[in-house]
Amino acid sequence: MENPYLPYPVRIDSVVTETEDRNLKTFKLVFLNSEDREKFIHRAGQFAELSIAGKGEIPIGIASAPTEKGYLLFTVNKVGVVTSALHQMESGDTIGVRGPLGNCYPWEQMEGSNVVIIGGGFAFTTLRASIVYMLHPDNRKRFGNLTVIYGARTPGMLLYKDELVAWEERDDIHMHITVDAADDPNWKYNVGFVPTITQETAPSAKDAYAIVCGPPIMIKFTLPILSELGFPPERIIMSLEMRMKCGIGMCGRCNIGTEYVCKDGPVFDLAHMSRLPNEY
Amino acid sequence: MEQIKEKIIRIARRLLVEKQVDAVLGFQRGTIPMMSQPILIREPEQVDRLHWDSFCAANLATYLPQRRDRVAVVAKGCDSRNIVLLTLENQIRRDQLHLIGVPCQGMVDRRRVLAKLNGREPLAVSETSEHLSIKGEAFEETLKRTEYLRENCVICTHRNPVIYDELVADLTPEQSDLDRYQDIHAVETKSADERWYHFEELLAPCIRCYACRNACPMCYCPTCFVDESNPQWLGKSVDSTDTKTFHFLRAYHLAGRCTDCGNCERACPLGIKVRQLTKKLEKDIKDLYDYEAGLSLEEPPPLDTYRPDDPQEFIR
Amino acid sequence: MADKIIKKADLPALLSRLLDHYRVYAPVRHQGMTNFQEISAADQVDLSHVNTTLSPKSLMLPQSESMFEFTLDRTSDQVGVLREIEKDFSPRIIFGIRPCDAKSFQLLDLNFDTPTYRDPWWVKRRQSTTLIGLGCNDPCSTCFCTSVGSGPFSTDGLDILFIDAGDEFAIQTVTEKGEQTFSKVEIGAEGSNATTDAVLSVQERALKLMKSAVHSKNLKDQDEKALFEADFWDEVQFGCINCGVCTFVCPTCWCFDIQDEVHKGNGIRLRNWDACMFPLFTLHGSGHNPRAQKLQRVRQRFMHKLKYFVDKYDVGVACVGCGRCVQQCPVNIDIRHVFRLMNDLGA
């Protein structure tokens, strides 16, 4: 019997500090055993439990796309015991990965549609995975227009800066990068909150899905704008965060009503969420 | 008992109708024999739900920390002492409270009665001032009330409320000339090893449900040390070291603050005599500082106070 | 109805033979309380209780379970790698389990043995255990098993059922596993008509003793959000002191926590019982807590048992009517009352 609690051992291959406050680092992980690598088949939107022996586990969205083979990327915000310990670790150290866990963005449903990706702050990780996945030559033609609105507090707080620049230069993706405030006179992108930029760019709701990930305040003000733009609740997709332990729907803490965020989620559409008790 | 109940209801109705308080904190009759449920009454129409009998043992002070409204509280001696302490520790203000004082004859221990019945289930229990009459499926039994009191009530020397705004009955004579610490002496005379073994045995059944802590009116820390996760002071398993650490540290935290209300022991689903730990510290505080917790609004617990002329050098 | 009988006087012999083949767990009385323990001799067993103080769930889901071990020794090539721990899953018997508690294992199977994931420790313990139940001749006034899909002599979830029929036990073999178990002990005789009559009479009497019933038939149709937002929660929760008594004594409360513990460079990953009553249960790393208030936690417990579980699995409530929480709650929060409030909302 497979033990769903047993993490695969992985080696930290590299660590990149993403943000100016040094609180966000991206860890590139490679499997110690090739058979584990082959078993780990994920889809964009899923998460995994990162395991540090002696400290515990933490659920983190998978930032690498399924099309990036041979390694996994996780961008981790330093918050508690496990993430602080992880931030102390270096390339060469061994940790564990358990997953992939949860559901993914509704890729089958979204096929053939336009996709609007709206992200804020450090919740951009599985959105990165989604963008990289959709931009892959094998997949790009399976989706229509691809629009990205991504904001952070300052330019230095944006994740994946090099990739953002590269995507800006492509003509098969419409990028709207924004910051709450910029003190850099050379800042050549938007200034303004994500909901404002969403309103200004007004992505068309025709044949489109919106995937929204970000801090609660961003979500709160973005959802009404999407509704105004004509996005029906069934096509507004969100990913939720909850305190988790098992990640497989057994330990009982991450439920919202009948749904376990770890197993039945973390991805829910707005129509589904509005049927659940407001307790998250 | 019936008279006391009627008096509580009358007072509660008056206080609510005259809007002297926003709510009355008391008991309603339990859904099973020998049990009661703490209840907060806000409407005068609801006051008839209030109840009083020998099983209203829970300490209502537990529900007071951080309340913002004006509350009338049905208070036995121990409840009143905990209210004094909570006032001293700024958890509630005296002027928010209206104490409906109940001189107490000691509360009856449901577990003791059940043990006596030895598996026969009580279906209805009534009482007079002297006796409990118990009816079951095919039996009736009359027990002498004083023989089934809770252990802390047996040795209680403050049955009357120490502060109150009105009383529901005449003050009762206080018990005196009793040794509050018989069980503690017995442990004190053991050797260190025997004592350790004693505590191991005492705490072995603990399942870490924290009923003792949560029932305690003085355990109101926003985050208890056992719940701190960063840093985490204590393991979460039922490892005996962690379990003992929890109980010992909790007891130390109650030194000079415990009124021996017995709410901890009453709540324990496994009947662990956790009062042994708190009583030892209660005794030490009495011996060292001649202080009994919660008797006066003027006198804070000795371990909460600082005096520049403290005789002990390390603290100056 | 009874496949066999054994004389009560032969029970010690039966237990001894079971002990030759199995690890045996049974009710043992210690310091005035009866709980399940592993026994080494037949005379340790005490069947005089109504039900055990703690449910037997710890035999399937121990309060603390070591999941994995690891070393933090940086000179080891296994540093930081979690390894499974060898455990004893040899055949065992739980003797004297009440039908309500056996039913709870069936309900917990829905959580621990799923089409997507199988909890290995739960599944292996379930597989290696034969459940020999003991019918309830004397249900207590807080028992309400008959209104939640079980009953004092229900065989659901049992492999074998013993019924106390006076001088003898009537024995009903329920499953193949039960039959195999019994074939090993070679004890017991054919029951007579007198046995059947005795069994019928104790069953009839027991049902008469059942004083509690709960209403649950509307729960499925009630609107989840309407229940969630109902006014009655404020009163239900007032007395609650947010301890873990109800969850820890409950046979169907399965929530757990996972923790690492390290001693001198070696560590284990443990899982421990946890409870929705504790604020830490849902506290996010950010400090946000979706169930920060006592009301939210009390509501979660009842909603989980009586609504979310009902809707998720469609096999009824996550409650077997054992009444332990009713007996043990220090402030008398009575689930039977909450059943009524939830079931009758809007009626």
Image (spheres, coloured by chain):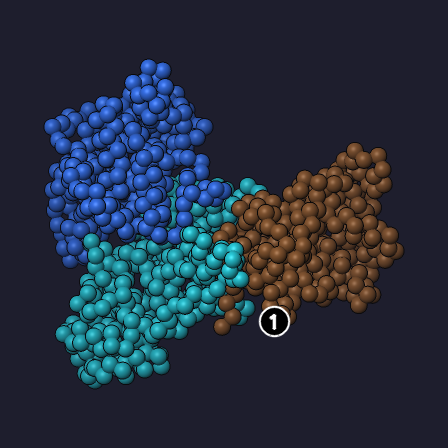
Chain colours: A brown, B blue, C cyan
On the question of residue C341 being in view, the answer is no
Which secondary structure, mark 1?
A: helix
- The one of A217 and C156 positioned closer to us in this rendering: A217
Q: Residue at x 67, y 62 (%)?
A: A71
Q: Which residue is mark 1?
A: A35
Tell me the quadrant of the picture where the C terminus of chain B can be found.
Answer: top left
- The one of C219 and C37 positioned closer to us in this rendering: C37
Placement of B70 over or under C276, stated as above or below: above
**x, y (%) of residue C46?**
20, 64
Instruction: Report which quarter residue B163 is drawn in.
Output: top left
Q: Residue at x 55, y 41 (%)?
A: C287
**Which residue is most to the front?**
C75
Q: Residue at x 29, y 26 (%)?
A: B294
**x, y (%) of residue B237?**
39, 52
- The one of A49 and C283 positioned closer to us in this rendering: A49
Question: How packed is label 1: few (under 14 Cα within 10 Å), some, or many (20 or more)?
Answer: few
**Which residue is most to the top?**
B309
- From the viewer's perspective, is B154 left or right of A221? left
On the question of residue B63 being in view, the answer is yes
Query: How many dots with numbers?
Result: 1
- From the viewer's perspective, is C4 left or right of C9? right
Placement of A277 over or under A179, stated as above or below: below
Question: Could you tell me which chain the residue with mark 1 belongs to?
Answer: A
**x, y (%) of residue B49?**
33, 38
Instruction: Report which quarter residue A209 is drawn in.
Output: bottom right
The disc labelled 1 sits on which kind of residue? Answer: Glu
- From the viewer's perspective, is A132 left or right of C96? right
- From the viewer's perspective, is A16 left or right of C75? right
Q: Residue at x 86, y 58 (%)?
A: A172
**x, y (%) of residue B292?**
25, 26
